[in-house]
Amino acid sequence: MTNASHEVAKGPHHASGAAPSALSAHSIVKRFPGVLANDSVDFDVLPGEVHTLLGENGAGKSTLAAMLCGLYQPDAGYITRNGERISLSSPRAGLQHGIAMVHQHFRLVERFTVAENVILGSRDLSYKLNRSELEDKVAAVAESYGLPIEPGATVGDLSVGQRQRVEIVKALYQGAEILLLDEPTAVLVPAEVEKLFENVHAMTKAGKSIVFISHKLGEVVEISDRVTVLRNGRVTGHVSGRGTTDTKELARLMVGRDIELTTQRASHATGHEVLQIRDLSLTVGGVSVLSDISFNVHAGEMVGIAGVAGNGQRELADTIAGLMSPTSGSIAISGSLTTDRGPIHARELGLAYVPEDRLGMGLVPSMSILDNLLLTRDRRVVVDRTTVRPEATRLIEQFEIKANGPDHMARKLSGGNAQKVLLARELSGGRTATKLLVVCSPTRGLDVGAIETVRALLDDARSAGQAILLISEDLDEVMSLSDRIFVLYRGSVVHETPGESAELATVGAAMAGLKPEGKS
Amino acid sequence: MNGNIWVLASADSVAIATTLILAALGALFTERAGVLNLGIEGILLTSAISSFLVADSSGSIWLGLIVGSLVGALLAGIHAVLSVVLRANQIVAGLALVIFGTGLANFLGKPAEGKTVTTLIKPLSFGPLSDIPLIGPIVFRQDPITYASIVIAIVSSLYLFRSRPGLELRATGDDPATVDAQGLSVASIRIRYTLFGGLLVGLGGSWLMLAQSAAWHQAATTNGVGWIALALVVFAGWRPMRLIFGAILFGFTLQLPFTLQAEQITFIPSALMQMLPYLATLIALIALSRPSTRNKLGAPKSLGIPFVRDER
Ligand SMILES: Nc1ncnc2c1ncn2[C@@H]1O[C@H](COP(=O)(O)OP(=O)(O)OP(=O)(O)O)[C@@H](O)[C@H]1O
Ligand SMILES: [Mg+2]
């Protein structure tokens, strides 16, 4: 786990307790209506170190990071920078103290070029902009940390990994000494994660400090010099020294019990065909998004769709859910055609759908948990909340959703908890008994405990005879749950394999568009 | 056919274009910051009558222009408070501003009804240049504000696309959350450009009054130019340079009915011709309502959407 380059980055800081921390939080308290998000939290990061914040969904990690960069103000406690007390009244103040945050939702203007995005907000520029000079300057900063970017490219055309690099370059350009990375790897494919970690090493070598937030324990073990565990807004654990911990210990520190993410497969023979897709093609705005896709999903079976984001997964799911009409081909659920019939029809045939965009398509952010549940429940004219309320309360408990109760507004949930509400609604069945479950990235942003719960629920659903289509960029997840795996690349199925005999290398190569089966 | 009248008509088109350029530039700056101000027509009217009253009582056209412009900024300030500070629905706030501005102008204009300004803003003369056939009257016989409006448009283009604050302005209209994360104040940027936009619209309205109309006639003074300016911004793709040409084209269509009438060309009913600009406005609004066309046209992405800082 610890290789040579890590050793170089690993500094002697912890040994010499005298070095003042680059940034520290002292007894920070932050309250939101009804929640104590941070309860007297102490946290510090040294120069040249990666300090990870770990914790369950809703533990208060993002809130703490937001206060460290000036986005939120603490209710009590204070922050010091190099031992001196500072007040961060805004993100601008944070930047002036050399603190920058890379948000999970990138803060980039898509229409601007990379260089324009990087220099946006810089105070020390002349009034007049000289494009080529700026691009050279930006390229120089990027290169000095080994971050290859093309300054003249339009951000809207870049991949997620490239955009993240732009965010990091932006922070460095503005002279950031401390970078807060909130779940930076949640949206990256494995190769991009590797690249990011190389960049992190280059930055720590240059004396920068990194505050890292992630739910992926393997990554945490690999990258962190120290780990602080948060639970219900409180610091509940510390691990220091690289290589002194493993994922199991971290999981135990986080959720207080052992977590075992095992492989699960269909326990019994699968039944009849629930989902039938025939020669499905979809063209959007003249561009072919899906071409000639045919497969079935049987009752009691889980079919996994692997692929790098943007290869047609989202459109495939939307087409099955009846939200998009295919250009040609057909879709049938339990033998009746759903093509062109709209989403209600598909739902009436027993479809449940967990879309990728949880706060956009999955939930109504401005409505309560209860009302969000009601959306898929009864369709009578008069809304009857009393009958659904007990169910809402039960689901909140079962899924361990951190909320004030059924009336908690969806927008005010932490990222992972919003995902849980959506899963709770879809997995618990709607008006008609669920026959087909289409789930997209169901565990993205969830903590290990929650991932275990969700996987168990998916497995239960499968054992109960539901047909499940699992669409995920998390290759591990697809490989360890699916009975059959299809790899989607540029809208076509380029590889098919039974889940049991699937090989990581082959599937990974297919995802990257390399011809599998070692032909080329 | 009398060739001379067409030369005059073209010269007129350029002149009418002045108000359009100024009002549309005002709307453009406001919208580039992400604020939709539908109240342009109301601002034009109120600043027109204000400039008239001031010029009339003080005898100074220039003072009239200045006060008229400031009144424009003041009214835009109301819109800024409603839509940026109070985060009201911008369409409703803008429409309210039209009604308010029209009412206010009519009230202020009561004593001025039918009166004329004694001294008008006069066209400049460039000596022999102004006498060049065709080009002379069109290019070299306009008044200073007309030339200024074109210069302002060119400078605006440079400002938007070649300067640091211009970059920040465009970013605010597209993606205010990003601007906020950079520590810039979205509210302050939006308010500033809404006010500046109002100032330009006010200048356009004052000029229309003091150089074109001479007499105050309630609604006849602006004739819906404010609405056309809004459409023009859409057709120009929020770009000042394209806006200049669009304004001249619209200016030409606006005066066409009069020229045709003078030429005794009657096979096209003049009422139909007068409809053209409004048809254009309608088409622009339809184009704006479709997200895909909006994007293609280059509309600021957060146009009309109040900004609330939110972590998620
Ligand atoms: N703006 C807000 N208004 C009200 N409550 C909030 C707000 N932001 C966060 N909270 C609450 O504060 C708590 C901590 O949230 P936070 O986003 O910090 O969690 P997190 O540790 O980042 O979780 P996740 O891993 O799910 O992202 C949660 O209970 C959340 O509901
Ligand atoms: Mg979070």
Image (spheres, rainbow, N blue to C red):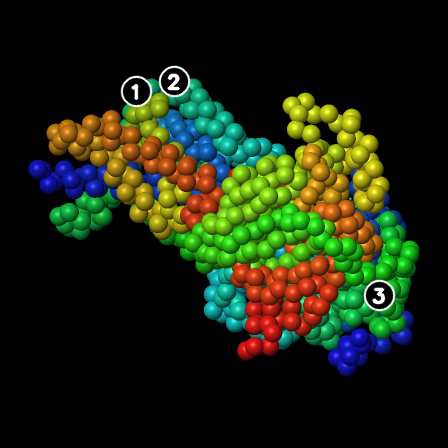
Q: Would you say residue A316 is visible in this rendering?
A: yes
Three-letter amino acid code at the position of disc 2 = Lys
Three-letter amino acid code at the position of disc 3 = Thr
- Do labels 1 and 2 touch, CB within 8 Å? no
* Circle 2 residue: B110
Q: Residues within 10 Å of mark 1 (few under 14, many from 20)?
A: few
Figure quadrant of residue A443: bottom right
- The image position of residue B169, as x and y in percent, is 52, 50
The correct choice, above or below, for B198 with respect to A148 in the image is: above
Give the CA separation, mark 3 to mark 2.
Answer: 81 Å
Q: Nearer the viewer, mark 3 or mark 1?
A: 3
Left or right of A221? Residue A329 is left
Does any atom of ligand 1 lie closer than 8 Å to the CB of label 1? no
- The image position of residue A279, as x and y in percent, is 51, 54
Three-letter amino acid code at the position of disc 1 = Gly
Which chain is indicated by disc 3?
A: A
The correct choice, above or below, for B66 with respect to A205 in the image is: above
- Do labels 3 and 1 touch, CB within 8 Å? no
